[in-house]
Each structure stands twice: as structure tokens, then as C-alpha cells.
Amino acid sequence: MHIYRVTFVSQGKVYVLYAEEVQQAEIYGFVEVRGILFGEHSSVVIDPAEEKLKSEFGGVARALVPIHAVIRIDEVEKRGQSKILDIEAGSNVTPFPIYTPGRGGERD
């Protein structure tokens, strides 16, 4: 089984997810992430960050991530810790700028 680590920006935070399948989606400009993996809770210790991800992506069959939000996709040997990170001031992670017509800089 292949395991992929997908890192992307969403709503001002950096998401790190592990999945079984990553591919180009049928919808242009999106990456399809299927089979999102979560840790097994065999101990009493529960990670609140992973629980938040599990509640957000638990019932999701496939997630479509905009290609411009993807920071990196790696094939890894084993599953690591899924997490949500804040983008700190001075960080080198910046969302890709998106052109939106009618918002400044438009010439007549």
C-alpha cells in the first residue's frame, strides 16, 4: 500500500494529511485525496489536533484540494502525525495569489 503525505493551505492554516490515494481530479485545477488515514487510538492518550482533523475529514470519501493550495505531496514509508499548523508571521508559506476580475489594478 502506498501512503502519501499531503501538505496544503486552507483558511489561513497549513494542513498535513496522510492518504492512500492522491491524483489529479476530474475537475480542472483540483487534486483528489482519497482514503485519508488517521491514527489508531490504542492508548489513553488522544491528540487533540488529530481529533479535530478526524471530525473535519472523518466522513469524507474524497477531498478536492485546489492545486494552488498544495504545498507538497510526498510518498512516504509509513503514516506520521496528521496536524493543523498556524501560519506564523514571517513564515515562508504564502498562499498562491489568485486573480479576481474587478478588484483593483484593472485597466479600462
Image: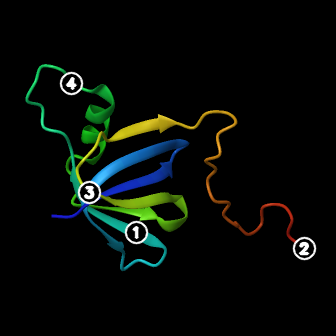
| Residue beneath disc 1 | 31
Between residue 9 and residue 105, name the one nearer to us: 9
Residue in the image at 90% along x and 73% along y: 107
Tag 2 secondary structure = loop
- Which quadrant: the C terminus? bottom right
| Residue beneath disc 2 | 107
Q: CA distance from mark 2 to mark 1?
A: 33 Å
Residue in the image at 33% along x and 49% along y: 17
Q: If you read the primary sequence from the N terminus, does the residue marked by circle 2 or circle 1 appear first? A: 1
Q: If you read the primary sequence from the N terminus, does the residue marked by circle 2 or circle 4 appear first? A: 4
Q: If you read the primary sequence from the N terminus, does the residue marked by circle 3 or circle 4 appear first? A: 3
Residue sticking out furthest to the right: 108
| Residue beneath disc 4 | 46
- Picture quadrant where residue 44 is located: top left
Q: Is residue 68 left or right of residue 65?
A: right
- Residue 1, percent from left and from top: 15, 64
| Residue beneath disc 3 | 19
Q: CA distance from mark 2 to mark 4?
A: 54 Å
Dot 3 amino acid type:
Ala
- Residue 42, percent from left and from top: 8, 29
Dot 4 amino acid type:
Ile
Tag 1 secondary structure = strand
Q: CA distance from mark 1 to mark 4?
A: 30 Å
Q: Is residue 22 left or right of residue 8?
A: left
Eye-nearest disc, 2 or 4: 4
